[in-house]
Amino acid sequence: MNMNSPVNIFALGGLGEVGKNTYAFETGNSIILVDAGVRFPEANLPGVDYVIPDYSYLKNNKARFKALFITHGHEDHIGGIPFLVRSVYIPVIYAPRLAAALIRHKLEDARIKEPIKIVEIDSDSHISIGDDFKVSFFRVTHSIPDAYGICIDTKQGRIIETGDFKIDLTPVGPKFELDKLAGLGAEGVDLLMADSTNAEIEGYTPSETAVRSGVEEIFEKAIGRIIVSTFSSNINRIQQVVEVALEHGRKICILGRSMENVVGIARKYGYIKIPDSAIVSDDHVKSLRASEVCILCTGSQGEAMAALSRISRGEHKVKIMPGDTIVFSSNPIPGNGALVDRLVNDLVKQGADVKQNSLAFSLHSSGHPSRQELRLMLSLCKPKNFMPVHGEYRMLRMHGDIGREIGVKEENIFICNNGDVLTLDNHKVYRGGHVPAEDVYIDGNDLDGVSAGVIRDREVLKNEGMVAILMTLGKKGEVIIPPIVYARGFSASLDTHIVRHAQMHAQEALNEALKERHGLGEIKNKVKNAVGKYIFRKTERTPMIIPVFMTENA
């Protein structure tokens, strides 16, 4: 037992990406984790439901794993918990009240039968993990209630991990505990790990309350139904929309599984206030006048299976009607712009009036800090060392530049990748080694994940198509039926002529391989290479080629 070991700090997710936030703090005796998020797949990950971190380091050191701390209840901070608890025993999860409720629902939904100890925390909580870590909290403002930054005191020094935040001086809900943060900074911060998501944007992020005026203007002018689509976890936004809708005499219809779940939990705990009499089901929407209806739904990112997309395709009980006003109360996540544009066009074709965040209508405010807020955070904390987190590489780099502006020494700014280890020893920070931190692609509920090779195969199938070569051999290895080629995923380019000649090339390669008495694996490779070269020469495409052998029954 090393009672005075250095502290290692590393990210399993959250660096070089937006999402998958998972930060580990390790001594010789203990490991604690801050957040356990998922990343939602980009368009280049076909068939993938979630991207989670590689938890192998935690599995290999499970005896030292003592606790998971949660900063707030967004999916990129709690979405990985059902996968983590199936991989590693978690003695206790410390989480804010709302996040704790969302986690309990998530574990129940994932059918996790083992009881998980969840302890609710607030800004007055102080938690000791043996003699290694003393953990306390300070309230921050974000787009979801009950969001906290975390202060971790160790024998080697103090670490602050901000979680997601923005410095909103007129928030919806409690204010940022700036005085508490300043007090921690005055006492001394050895390492600051701070949210970098908006490091490219100068100035201040607009207050959440600024969105209300844009929403009110739409409600005042709209004479038909109003359909508002936003993130289900943006509880502060949903509360504002609900308040405006009720002021204008509209009933609330909630659509989308995640929206129903989150709003239900938020209502139960008092974060969203909607009288039961103001809520109507989708079956009763038709019985109301259009001017009496406000629909809250998922799908602001153009997701194919979300409620708004299903409504636009006519696959929902609620149909688009001419005169509907559709409000996108969010900005597209990078990579989703094309999906959102396609959905907007479909809605406009059906006669809807679509409103998006713009100079004309302030319908969205980020939950993350812009550059002036990042400067203020650094000025209040006065860190000796700085590690930008929560962001793509360019965001981390730009946040590092802001740290340099504020006075952090160049050699004390650490731009890291997932898996890179920093070591805190006697109030000094230096780079250490590396731990496994690759992406794990979740397809369905398979915890083993999908390998990068499978993802590459799916990309080939999507972009290049597939060719199967069927070959039938006799008991003595002779050819009974000449190779037959089947092609899928091509346009008319792979015509009968090309298929016939591909079969001839396959036959030649097969005969040659049999003559040279190659094994089955080598025969497949020779046939595959011969057909692949021919098809590329004719079509300039590289489809997936699958040789299949059938043998005569004995």
Image (cartoon, grey):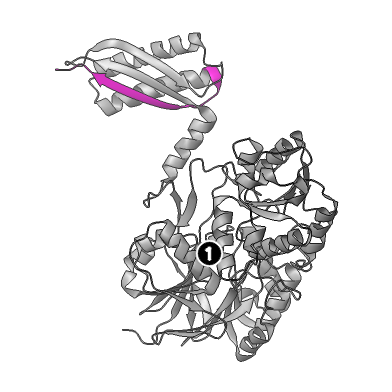
Q: Quadrant of the N terminus?
A: bottom left
Q: Would you identify the image quadrant in which residue 56 lies?
A: bottom left
Front-most of 32 and 386?
Answer: 32
Boundaries of the magenta span:
538-554
Q: Position of residue 401 (x, y in %)?
A: 69, 69
Q: What is the crowding at mark 1: few (fewer than 14 residues within 10 Å), some, or many (at least 20)?
A: many
Mark 1, residue position: 77
Looking at the picture, how far across and down is residue 388, in whole percent?
A: 61, 69
In the image, residue 132 sits, relative to residue 345, either above or below, namely below
Amino acid marked by disc 1 = His
The residue most toward the bottom is 187
Residue 233, position as x, y percentages in the image: 60, 60
The foreground one among 552 and 233 is 233
Percent position (x, y) of residue 111? 38, 57
Q: Residue furthest left?
A: 554
| Left or right: 437, with 284 as reference point | left
Relative placement, left or right, of 232 versus 450 is right
- Inspect this view and state whether residue 71 appears: no
For the point 64% across and 44% down, the residue is 308
Q: Relative to 314, is 11 on the left or the right?
A: left
Task: Give the quarter of the figure containing the C terminus.
Answer: top left
Q: Quadrant of residue 199?
A: bottom right
- Residue 542 on the magenta segment: yes
Q: Secondary structure at mark 1?
A: helix
Residue 122 against residue 314 in the figure, above or below: below
Instruction: Say above or below: 498 vs 29.
Output: above
Regarding residue 194, the answer to whether it shows in the image is: yes
Q: How many marks?
A: 1
Q: Is residue 58 left or right of residue 248?
A: left
